[in-house]
Image (cartoon, coloured by chain):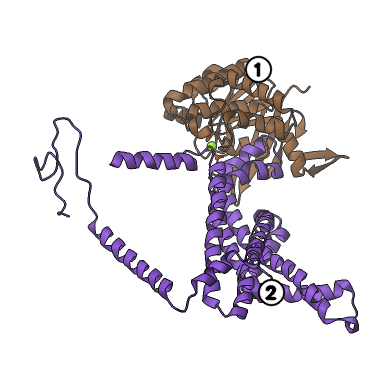
Chain colours: A brown, B purple
Amino acid sequence: MTETLVRARNVRKSYGHVEVLKGVSLTVKPGEVMCLLGPSGSGKSTFLRCINHLERIDGGRIEVGGDLVGYARRHGKIFEMNPREVSRQRRGIGMVFQRFNLFPHMTALENIMAAPVGVKKVERAAAKARAYELLERVGLSHVAGHYPAQLSGGQQQRVAIARALAMDPELLLFDEPTSALDPELVGDVLDVMRQLAADGMTMIVVTHEIGFARSVADTVVFMDGGVVVEAGSPAEVLDNPQNPRTVAFLNSVM
Amino acid sequence: MSSPAPTFPDTAPGAVGSEVSGDDDVVAIPLRHPWRWVVAALLVLALAGLVASLWTNPNIEHSTIATYLFNPKIINGVGLSLLVTVVAMLISTVLGVLLAVMRLSKNPVMNAFAWLYVWVFRGTPLLIQIVFWGYLGLLYSQISLGVPFTDFTVFSVDTNTLVPAFVAGLLALTLNQAAYSAEIIRSGMLSVDPGQHEAAASLGMSPSYTLFKVVLPQAMRVIIPPMGNETISMLKQTSLLSVIAVLELYTVATQISSQNLRQVELLLVVSAWYLFLTSVLSVPQYYLERHYGRGTAAQAPSLLERIIQSRIIQRRKR
Ligand SMILES: Nc1ncnc2c1ncn2[C@@H]1O[C@H](COP(=O)(O)OP(=O)(O)O)[C@@H](O)[C@H]1O
Ligand SMILES: [Mg+2]
């Protein structure tokens, strides 16, 4: 067991000639909740997507649980993983999206069961029981048979969280999970995330909810222009920011 | 019919025929469409005239139509046309999925192959493709049997051309259809939100699992209506197989009419069958659309529900 779960070293990523990540380094310990803040276009989503290899990095390295993301070490050499190996690696890293991305042709229950049954080959009955359990945990057992289109945004996002949890990930990534929600629905989703944090889940959360970051995060990281500008405890970064860019950003969102 | 009266209670109180009730409900005379009735009447008249002229035409023998409508040869032809349609559509759909996936893959070799395939099969006339496969079938049967040319008898040519002609026809229609289906399936796959791919990937789903369980079921909603059209065209296109003497409906009909010289009657028989079959083929489309539309807001009601609903609406109108 390593002391750090996620270790990013000097991660660089470009789209064409535009360098979006210009050397991002950070570490996340098991059970830690890290909130990523920063203005729009600063590269937060891109960095998150690099962690589960939805994007390929152009430089640096990312390790999750001691394994390189997207690459395998064999006989002292580093090989790019094939799609099957990438899929296997992603099972340990859950992701929750801004636009929920539930499968619209499946009910809430089927959404949660899909990956355990189809990927992990869990028996249907067991997967179903587990899915009900997870729906209960996010307070939605009464909508098990509903299709996503029949659910509110807040309910959809909670089902999406349950779907990610169904794979028993060691790390959960959230990309602005409440940004697409009506204000009155944000609280329910944040409550679920707060409970997850209390249960010891390791989470990296991109968010603009400063209140959530202050009360739940162990570490707050402020990104701007593809680099980490400032990182530390909520008290340090949110209440006593040192960098003028952090100050300007916090003034604009608070 | 009188000219439409102004029907807003507050602007024209007590206007002809309109009620101004005490409460807030607007009770208005519906807008009338007199021209619709005129046009409809003209169309009905024209159609009736056409039918009457056909019906009373001394050159058409109604008894011939009646005799041949359920003639065993014609029924066999109907069966073969339907068989070719169903088999060609099934195989071409599988090929179409394959081509669409190749076309969308990042592998440049696969991509180029799929592009070339669609380019060739969509870019040349179907009739020519049918004749081409017909000749190839003939050639193939000679080679595969390994019969020396000297031993070739007249009868064996006949039997040998019949079986390969069917296979050649099926091949021609299937390969051609695959090119069209591939484009329909590809556009259906492109219509699926890219977020769906990301969600599936983040759950550790493999690319093929994602394709079959996440992308294609959603693409079906977009794919099925045009594929229904394709099925109907396929049924009608089977008549082109007459050029290589496949014994489908139209070939059989021309064979009969070349003997009894009742061309028009047999064409009417054939048309009636095509019309009947295309109507029947739209039933499975309805149920497929309903199945793959699940989970969307605009869920189509069942056929029964629709009939009941329209009855209720009609009764309310009275
Ligand atoms: N697929 C892409 N292709 C090209 N540019 C992209 C792509 N994704 C993101 N970008 C660019 O990268 C920058 C960072 O984007 P993103 O990581 O989404 O920022 P954030 O999530 O912090 O708002 C933006 O300027 C965006 O336009
Ligand atoms: Mg973003």
Furthest residue in direction top, as rendered: A198
For the N terminus of chain A, the image quarter is top right
Position of residue B155 relative to residue A202, above or below, is below
Answer with left or right where residue B308 lies relative to residue A229: left
Q: Nearer the viewer, residue A169 or B41?
A: B41
Q: Quadrant of ligand 1?
A: top right
Q: Is the CB of the residue bearing disc 1 within 8 angstroms of ligand 2?
A: no
Q: Image point 67% across, 36% down: which residue?
A: A52
Position of residue B208 relative to residue A108, above or below, is below
Q: Residues within 10 Å of mark 2 (few under 14, many from 20)?
A: some
Q: In this view of the protein, can residue A201 be seen by the observer?
A: yes
Answer with left or right where residue B43 lies relative to residue B147: left
What is the distance, in whole Å, between disc 2 and disc 1 at their CAs? Answer: 74 Å
Q: Image point 91% across, 80% down: which residue?
A: B148
Q: Nearer the viewer, residue B57 or B15?
A: B57
Position of residue B250 relative to residue A82, above or below, is below
Label 2 residue SS: loop
- Residue B9 position within the rendered picture, expressed as x and y whole percent measured from the top left: 13, 39
Disc sitting over residue B245 in the figure:
2
Is the residue at mark 2 from the same chain as the one at mark 1?
no
Q: Amino acid at mark 1?
A: Gly
Furthest residue in direction front, as rendered: B63
Task: Write down the residue under mark 1.
Answer: A200
